[in-house]
Image (cartoon, grey):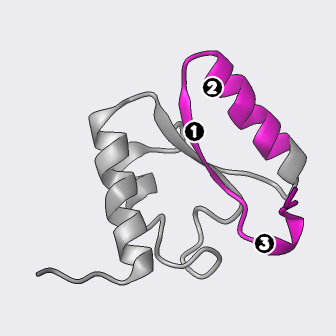
Amino acid sequence: MRQLNYALAINEALHQMMEADESVFLIGQGVKSPWYVGRTPEGLLDRFGPERVIDTPVSENAITGAAVGAALAGMRSVVVHPRMDFMRMS
C-alpha cells in the first residue's frame, strides 16, 4: 500500500482534478509560496499557469466572493484560506 503524507495527498488530488477538468482552478493566499500552505500547491503553477493558480492578496471575503461568482459562471474553484482563525463555525 502506498503511503503519502497529508500535504502530498492534497497536492496529488489537485493535480488530478485540474488535469481532468479545465474548469477547476485554485485561488487563495500563498498558493505560490511553498512555505505558506506547505507543499499542497507544489508544481501547479508551472503545470497549469497563473490563470488557474491564482495567488491573491489578503482578503478572505474577496477570495470567497470570487470563488462563489466563478461557481455561478460554471467554474469549479478550490479555495485556500490558510488561517483557521478566519473560519466561522455555525
Instruction: Look at the image and give the residue range highlighted in magenta.
Output: 62-90
- Give the SS element for disc 1: strand
Q: Which residue is mark 1?
A: 77
- Give the CA separation, mark 2 to mark 1: 7 Å
Give the crowd class for mark 3: few <14, some 14-19, many >=20 residues within 10 Å: few
Query: Is residue 64 part of the magenta span, yes or no?
Result: yes
Q: Amino acid at mark 1?
A: Ser
Q: Provide the residue designation for mark 2.
A: 71
On whether residue 66 falls in the magenta region, the answer is yes
Percent x, y for residue 49? 45, 44
Residue 70 percent across, percent down from the top left: 65, 26
Query: Element under label 2?
Result: helix
Pick the residue in front: 74 or 58. 74
- Disc 2 vs disc 1: Cβ atoms closer than 8 Å? yes
Marks 1/3: CA distance?
Answer: 18 Å
* Quarter of the figure that contains the C terminus: bottom right
Q: Is residue 84 above or below residue 73?
A: below
Q: Amino acid at mark 3?
A: Arg
